[in-house]
Amino acid sequence: MQHQLDYVLRTVEERGVRFVRLWFTDVLGQLKSFAITPAELETALEEGMTFDGSAIEGFSRVQESDMLALPDANTFEILPWRGEDAPVARMFCDVQHLSGEPFEGDPRNVLRRNLERAREKGFTFFAAPEMEFFYFQSQTAPEPLDRAGYFDLTEMDMASNLRKQTILTLEAMGIPVEYSHHELGPSQHEIDLRYTDALTMADNVMTFRVVVKEVARDLGVYATFMPKPIAGAFGSGMHTHLSLFEGDVNAFYDPGDEYGLSKVGRAFIAGLLRHAREITAVTNQTVNSYKRLIVGYEAPVYICWARNNRSALVRVPLPKKGKESSARIEFRSPDPACNPYLAFSVMLAAGLKGIEEGYDLAPEATNNIYEMTAEERAVEGIDSLPQSLSEAVNVMEGSELVAEALGEHVFDYFIRNKRTEWADYKAQVTAWELDRYLGTI
């Protein structure tokens, strides 16, 4: 650790860094930051920096407002878009009480706590999200830059230049990219991040969203992670590939199983499926998220698993020959507007519960679930994900699993905030209602 602190101090001096931005995340997944000067850096690394927690959404009330932001030296990176003339660096922080106790409202701390539970059982949790997003002409209207489709090689140099610059910037910040392509929607893109441990990945997702927006702004366009900005087009998901390792061994893999799945892998999937409805408010946290989770756009609606069926909530990709360590499952409901620390926490909690309780995995869904009638799905025991934020929050509120995974502080605040969001939405009169009713009633 001391070696890393020395590296940070030396780099700041050698590169002439003017400011170091301390990054942390509020309960809703919004990135917060404040800047310190190099003169304050050594103290910050050793003792943390005090800031007013009552100014941060969901952190604390005024009477307990002083918090400590303790930088994680392992996350030190120079921000490539700030130029070489006056370099600016960043570090993610863990938020603590002044006593040094971890702050229960800090999402990074929530994830650490859940990872510790997995570690006690001998597991390390890995994640690899596929990040989808849209580019638009501006942030005032969803006006696409192109009309290209999936994997299209468009003549739109702008779009490929945006993606290229984004990937170069990510890699300059130590975030490796697996691959990227144009997605199904107009002006929609996907960049897949190479798998790593879940805490590093949650930091990477936060950085990714900043990088995508910064690069877009530099090139005069706007990037959005809104799950469904265009009615009638495909929405943006954050399909997340998950695996557990015991040491260097992939705990999900069993060569003797017809699906290549170990007992642990099967129970993890069963846990995800059984608790899917409870965790949906966290993995899909906006009113708009539920405009994506509808039939007809390849987003999952029904709670089941399959190997090649993209309508299933959990997909089990077959491991390539000789690549058994890459055995994983793909959880397809999350969207890129989620708080990654909390989303990874509840996914892990659901999977671990399946392992602890020895849940049995239901049979693979072999039909196209969308073509089955409601009665046929009921016979097969295939339930649906919540259809609105209101329904998702109601289900979450009754969930012991989510309450334990998030901790009381985050759980209570999240529910309160989302109820307010739903009430605000319900009070709106939309263009659809005016079109439908104003001239006919």
Image: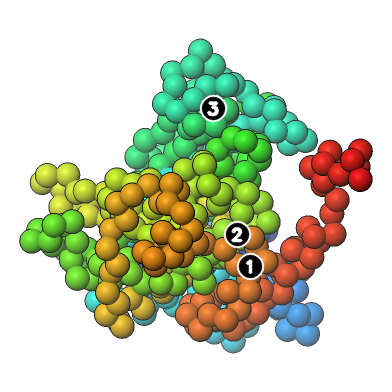
- Label count reads 3
In-front residue for pair 439/317: 439
> In this image, 325 relative to 177: left or right?
left
Sort mark 2 into few (<14), some (14-19) or many (20+) by Cα contacts within 10 Å.
Answer: some
Disc 1 residue type?
Answer: Glu
Which residue is outermost to the top? 155
Q: CA distance from mark 3 to mark 1?
A: 37 Å
Question: Can residue 410 be seen by looking at this rendering?
Answer: no
Q: Residue 180, percent across and down?
A: 41, 33
Which of the numbered marks, if any, corresponds to residue 44? none
Q: Which residue is mark 2?
A: 387
Position of the C terminus, as image quadrant, is top right
Which tag is nearer the camera, tag 3 or tag 2? 2
Q: Which residue is mark 3?
A: 162
Q: Secondary structure at mark 1?
A: helix
Q: Residue 103, percent across and down?
A: 58, 79
